[in-house]
Image: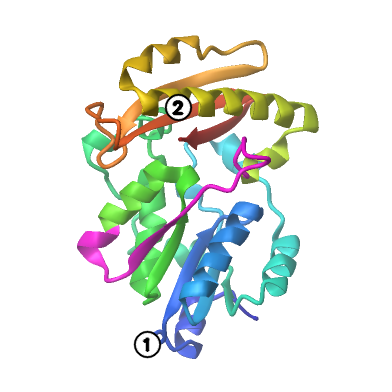
């Protein structure tokens, strides 16, 4: 495994004419990230993983400051997985004078997290744009847990780059709560509470997908002293509109537990 701290150096030493897959991360790796890496290794000849905590996608400074950082542990994990290349750039290299920190998104996508985290996806697209302009990777691997992010990145890439977007399924803890870097900010009691809440959401989602007349079940999803719901919404998974059928609907949720924000979709 070769670790690069410079995009320029990586470009000089890596042959991007080869079938190289890319897994962008913000570190604090978990089983979800490991699944992305393994999917990439199955399809591509070489795997490149980036670790970059992108300041421009945080709409609150405290959130950026508190985001879990486990770089040494992450490097060991990637080494065990036999990843070929790891990129760990700094902020100055990513956001040079000519690199925008934000890229505007269409108004129709300013729903769900686009509404409750203003500027978040604009920051995500800015760093993806920087990476793909510099790194001529064949495929980029993204997790379904961040479905809205996947959809925005997919539409953005389609118009500008030849890179193919590969969606990988959400990896869950005992079939309930998804693995997330933010889970590391919670204790075991909070994890169990979040798991119980997620199981309820999964059941409601299944019932609605069996019969869309069951949308009234959403009214039964309520917060409590432990969980504060930000949104629970049914959307069309192709365009995030509120016009959907049984085949294309998705249930999206965002909630807080112990001031930690978690997202999911079913």
Residue lying farthest to the right in this orientation: 188
Q: Nearer the viewer, residue 45 or 186?
A: 45
Q: Which mark is residue 264?
A: none
Q: Nearer the viewer, residue 91 or 28?
A: 28
The answer to which image quadrant residue 243 occupies is: top left
In the picture, measured across the screen, residue 9 lies left or right of residue 178, that is left
Queried whether the magenta region covers residue 161, the answer comes back as yes
Residue found 64% across the figure and 25% down from its top: 259
For numbered disc 1, what is the local secondary structure? loop
Quadrant (top left, top right, bottom left, bottom right) of the C terminus:
top left
Q: Residues within 10 Å of mark 1 (few under 14, many from 20)?
A: few
Location of residue 195 with respect to 8 vertically, above or below? above
Q: Which mark is residue 205?
A: 2
Residue found 70% across the figure and 24% down from its top: 193
Magenta residues (range)? 157-179
Residue 86, x across and y down, in percent: 59, 73
In the picture, measured across the screen, residue 80 lies left or right of residue 231, that is right
For numbered disc 2, what is the local secondary structure? helix
Mark 1 or mark 2, earlier in chain: 1
Q: Nearer the viewer, residue 139 or 86?
A: 139
Residue lying farthest to the front in this orientation: 210
Queried whether the magenta region covers residue 109, the answer comes back as no
Question: According to the image, label 1 marks what residue?
Answer: 17
Disc 1 versus disc 2: nearer the observer: 2
């Amino acid at each position: 495994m070769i670790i690069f701290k410079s995009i320029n150096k990586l470009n000089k030493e890596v042959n991007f004419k080869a079938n190289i897959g890319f897994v962008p991360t913000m570190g604090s790796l978990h089983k979800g990230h490991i699944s992305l890496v393994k999917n990439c290794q199955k399809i591509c000849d070489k795997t490149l993983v980036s670790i970059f905590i992108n300041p421009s996608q945080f709409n609150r400074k405290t959130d950026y400051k508190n985001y879990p950082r486990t770089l040494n542990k992450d490097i060991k994990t990637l080494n065990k997985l036999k990843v070929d290349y790891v990129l760990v750039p700094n902020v100055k290299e990513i956001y040079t004078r000519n690199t925008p920190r934000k890229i505007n998104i269409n108004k129709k996508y300013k729903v769900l997290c686009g509404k409750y985290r203003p500027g978040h996806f604009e920051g995500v697209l800015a760093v993806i744009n920087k990476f793909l302009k510099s790194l001529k990777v064949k495929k980029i691997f993204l997790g379904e847990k961040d479905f809205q992010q996947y959809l925005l990145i997919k539409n953005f890439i389609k118009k500008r780059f030849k890179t193919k977007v590969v969606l990988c399924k959400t990896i869950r803890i005992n079939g309930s709560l998804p693995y997330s870097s933010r889970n590391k900010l919670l204790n075991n009691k909070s994890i169990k509470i979040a798991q119980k809440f997620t199981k309820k959401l999964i059941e409601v989602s299944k019932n609605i997908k069996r019969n869309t007349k069951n949308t009234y079940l959403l009214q039964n999803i309520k917060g409590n002293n432990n969980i504060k719901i930000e949104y629970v919404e049914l959307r069309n998974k192709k365009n995030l509109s509120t016009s959907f059928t049984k085949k294309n609907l998705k249930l999206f949720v965002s909630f807080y537990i112990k001031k930690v924000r978690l997202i999911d979709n079913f």
